[in-house]
Amino acid sequence: MAVQNEITYAQAVRDAMREEMARDPDVFLMGEDIGVYRGAFGVTQEMYREFPGRVIDTPIAEAGFVGVAIGAAVEGMRPIVEIMFSDFISVCFDMLLNQAPKMHFMFGGKVQVPLVVRAAAGCGTGAAAQHSQSLEAMLCHIPGLKVVAPSTPYDAKGLLKSSIRDNNPVIFLEEKTLYRTKGLVPDHDYTIPLGQADIKRTGSDCTLVTYGRMVPTCLSAANTLLKEGISCEVVDLRTLLPMDKPAIFESVKKTKRLLIVHEAVKTGGLGGEISASVAESDAFYYLDAPIRRLAAWDTPVPFSAVLEKGVLPDEEKVCAAVRELMG
């Protein structure tokens, strides 16, 4: 029988990188303060000792070191780049918009870019407007990228190992408030295929489609609603691009109601893409109520803890939205 250990989300990410670096000498890490300082959130703790010369502290120059990583990937290496906060992806956006995702296509398939860009995403830490954004919808608009957003330690480890082994550029979004959460993770080598959603909870009355930090929020809401006789199914997308739309459609056909929950702002968010996809599918004809989106307000994230909490979806708001859908 496989042994499972309870570890944190951060440890799961670290273990995935350690195991892949031990397995493949072409895997290496780059990023700001990831060596002795162990990264802004302690994820790369002591890795520089275990892999000397393969954990590279970079200058504060995201465009530069992401560009270096793309070049290394094209030459056959498998770099993992840590962007301290996902907001700083904006600094190297030309590399992630015009270079990494397009090279395989523009060179007729002769070039591969096996690059992973890890970034701490989301809010909930009082880090204010420039360190708290959820930019996944913007990244999902770029053909050639893959975008991953795990919600549990088990998913984080399995999906990161798959991302490192993938021959395409992958943006791996780690919700910073999940780093200390714990879960059971097998001690053997395993991977989770990219593009495969997970039903975190089965239900019959309403589908909650979500990802990242909003998964535990939706699970808590589902527990509360069950006491009122409302059974919710929670679909964790896990991979945002490519998205497992068939899993969403099948759940909607079963429950006949859909609430999409994400931490990003509502306008232009993934909720609109999911909603449109359901409306364009045969699942639309099974709906007994309009599709509903629950997201953050269209505002920069406030520094104040009270205001920050106010603009975000939470358990109470999820419950209220489901009750409205149930009529």
Image (cartoon, rainbow, N blue to C red):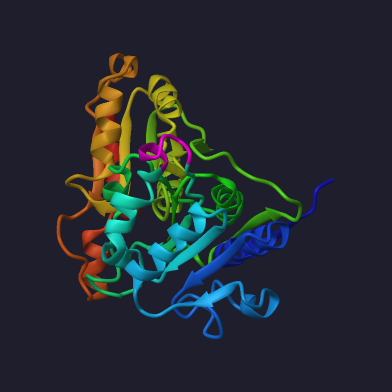
- Using the image as rendered, state which of residue 31 and residue 15 is in the foreground: 31
Residue shown at 38% from the left, 25% from the top: 252
Which of the image's four quarters has the N terminus? top right
Q: Could one spot residue 134 in this view of the protein?
A: no
Residue shown at 79% from the left, 53% from the top: 3
Total of numbered circles in the picture? 0
Residue shown at 44% from the left, 58% from the top: 70
112 over 88 or under it: above or below: above
123 over 153 or under it: above or below: below
Magenta-colored stretch includes residue 24: no
Q: Position of residue 56 (x, y in %)?
A: 53, 76
Q: Could one spot residue 108 in this view of the protein?
A: yes
From which residue to which does the magenta span run?
104-110
**Quarter residue 28 falls in:** bottom right
- Using the image as rendered, state which of residue 148 and residue 264 is in the foreground: 148
Q: Position of residue 247 (x, y in %)?
A: 46, 28
Magenta-colored stretch includes residue 108: yes
**Quarter residue 278 falls in:** top left
